[in-house]
Structures are given as C-alpha cells and as structure tokens.
Image (cartoon, rainbow, N blue to C red):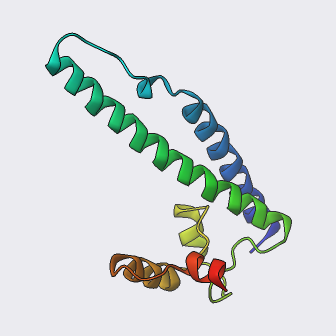
C-alpha cells in the first residue's frame, strides 16, 4: 500500500473518530424521565433503550477506529490480525477500521454465530 493511500485511510479514521466523539458526548437520550402517564413512561423507556443501544454501537465503533489508528503507530495497519495477510484495499476503503481480511472476518462471524470464541477472545486467553 502506498504512503498516499495510508494517509487517506488515516485521515478518514481521524474524521470518523472526531464524529463519533461528538455523538457519544450527547447522552441526553438516556436520562430517566418520570411521567404520571403509564404510556408516556413506556415510550420514554423505549426511547432510552434505543439511545443506549446506539451509544453501545457507537462506542464499539469508536474502539475499533482507535485500534485501527493504533495500528498505524506500529506499522501493522492493513495487515490481518489473524492470518497476517494484507487486507484488500477495497475492504479498507469500505471499512477503514477493519482488523481482519474478509476470509478471517467471515470465519470469526461464523464462530460468533455458533457461540464459539472469537479471535479476540482466543488472543486474550492465550
């Protein structure tokens, strides 16, 4: 991968990180509101649950973006964390924070769907 391509991916990741930080700071949707009306209470609870799920999703994405930026520091960006092969530039263009090549990601997704350990869990337990 060329230096110019790497810089483009790094710039994309830094912009995504800034965007996610702005979104995560806004946590107004998870405050608990009391209402005398039971239906309003249920609606507030559903809205709060949705806000919490969005916050969880954005936090996980921010973690992945930060991990990808950290891989620039040790010059491992663009290399699969599992098989150590190069990650396709097309994949990185679509998902710049990808840590796995498409083959390893599919295998990890299958393992997760079957309730087995993910690559990350295997690395932690090793």
The residue at 23%/21% (across/down) is 41
Q: Position of 22 compared to 49: left or right?
A: right
Between 7 and 110, the one nearer to me in the picture: 110
The residue at 43%/28% (across/down) is 30
Between 26 and 123, the one nearer to me in the picture: 123
The residue at 47%/22% (across/down) is 28
Among the 4 quarters of the image, the one containing residue 63 = bottom right
Q: Residue furthest top?
A: 36
Among the 4 quarters of the image, the one containing residue 79 = bottom right
Answer above or below: position of 45 versus 41: below
Percent from the top left, x then y, of residue 16?
Answer: 62, 45
Percent from the top left, x then y, of residue 86?
Answer: 66, 83
Between 82 and 1, the one nearer to me in the picture: 82
Q: Position of 36 compared to 2: left or right?
A: left
| Number of callouts | 0
Answer above or below: position of 107 versus 63: below
- Res. 81 in view: no
Q: Position of 64 compared to 102: left or right?
A: right
Between 3 and 105, the one nearer to me in the picture: 105
- Res. 65 in view: yes
Quarter of the image that includes the N terminus: bottom right
Percent from the top left, x then y, of residue 62?
Answer: 60, 50
Quarter of the image that includes the C terminus: bottom right
The residue at 34%/37% (across/down) is 49
Q: Position of 35 compared to 88: left or right?
A: left
């Amino acid at each position: 991968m060329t230096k110019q391509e790497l810089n483009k991916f790094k710039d994309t990741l830094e912009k995504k990180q800034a965007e996610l930080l702005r979104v995560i700071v806004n946590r107004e949707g998870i405050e608990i509101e009391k209402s005398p009306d039971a239906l309003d209470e249920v609606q507030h609870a559903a809205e709060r649950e949705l806000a919490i799920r969005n916050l969880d999703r954005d936090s996980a994405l921010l973690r992945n973006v930060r991990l990808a930026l950290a891989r620039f520091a040790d010059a491992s960006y663009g290399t699969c964390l599992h098989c150590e092969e190069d990650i396709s530039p097309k994949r990185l263009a679509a998902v710049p924070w990808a840590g796995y090549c498409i083959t390893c990601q599919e295998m990890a997704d299958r393992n997760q769907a079957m309730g087995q350990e993910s690559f990350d869990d295997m690395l932690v337990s090793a």
